[in-house]
Amino acid sequence: MKKIISILCALTVLVTVFSHPAEAATGMQGYAAYRDGVAGVIEWHAAIMDKASSDDIYPVIHADKGSNVGYAWWYEFMNGTEEYPYSNNNFIGYYRPLSNITSSQRDQVTATARSLAADFIGYTVWGQINYPVDNNPTGKTTVEKSDITAMRCDGVVEYCYEYNNVVIYPKYSSYWDISHWSKANYDEHIAVQITPAIQATEYMTLVSYNP
């Protein structure tokens, strides 16, 4: 009888574990990282943390000037592949959306960032995202990674969150979702209405200053 009870208890534990999946994101995974040192009104550079720590292998995913959206070592994120080791930029901090974000949502954000990195999307400085907004013969409403032709670093951050229904910018606008296919949404994210510095300081909240 005791053996049967033990088996039943073990089965109960297994059912509980598998019916409530563990949230896997750890450390800084799924948060945005920012550093200074960018010329002009852009000011800062942004990335999504794919790993828990800056000490990990290829910890960030970003859109880097002169390259594609992709993985980068921490020194590449901090200095840029062309300038390293001559730059002396400062880490600004890790940031998250103003609304709280669960570990499960952070997993979704990193998964989206990885899908962007796998698609060799180009870089643009003229806005957060480029896609053929005026050419939508099928009437789709969601901008998928295959639709995107170019992104800026803060566009990568915003897309990874808002594709997963986590609002970044603008918090009071009907056109906040960068992944929603429409001219109004597209125009809300062009030029420098929003920059990495504005994104972090006005529409996100600091998690940690420690790189």
Image (cartoon, rainbow, N blue to C red):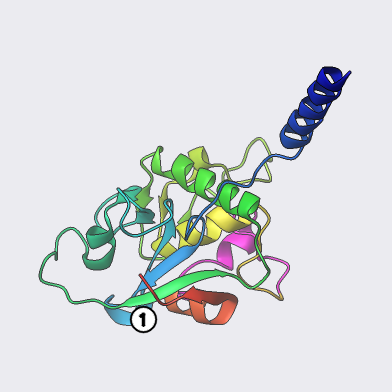
Name the residue located 57 percent from the left edge and 60 percent from the top edge.
186
9 sits to left or right of 140: right
Q: Nearer the viewer, residue 209 or 20?
A: 20
Residue farthest to the left, as pictured: 86
| Magenta-tinted stretch | 173-195
Label 1 residue SS: helix
Q: Height in image: 198 above or below 6?
A: below
Quadrant location, the N terminus: top right
4 sits to left or right of 206: right
Q: Nearer the viewer, residue 16 or 151?
A: 16
Can residue 134 be seen from the camera position used here? Answer: no
* Residue 175 located within the stretch drawn in magenta: yes
Q: Amino acid at mark 1?
A: Val
Can residue 122 be seen from the camera position used here? Answer: yes
| Residue hosting label 1 | 41
* Residue 138 image point, x, y percent: 66, 35
Q: Quadrant of residue 40?
A: bottom left
Name the residue located 51 percent from the left edge and 54 percent from the top edge.
26
Q: Main secondary structure of the magenta part?
A: loop
Name the residue located 53 percent from the left edge and 45 percent from the top edge.
112
* Residue 66 image point, x, y percent: 24, 55
- Badge 1: residue crowd in 10 Å (few <14, some 14–19, many ≥20): few
Quadrant location, the C terminus: bottom left
* Residue 86 image point, x, y percent: 10, 71
183 sits to left or right of 174: left
* Residue 92 image point, x, y percent: 38, 77
Q: Quadrant of residue 90?
A: bottom left
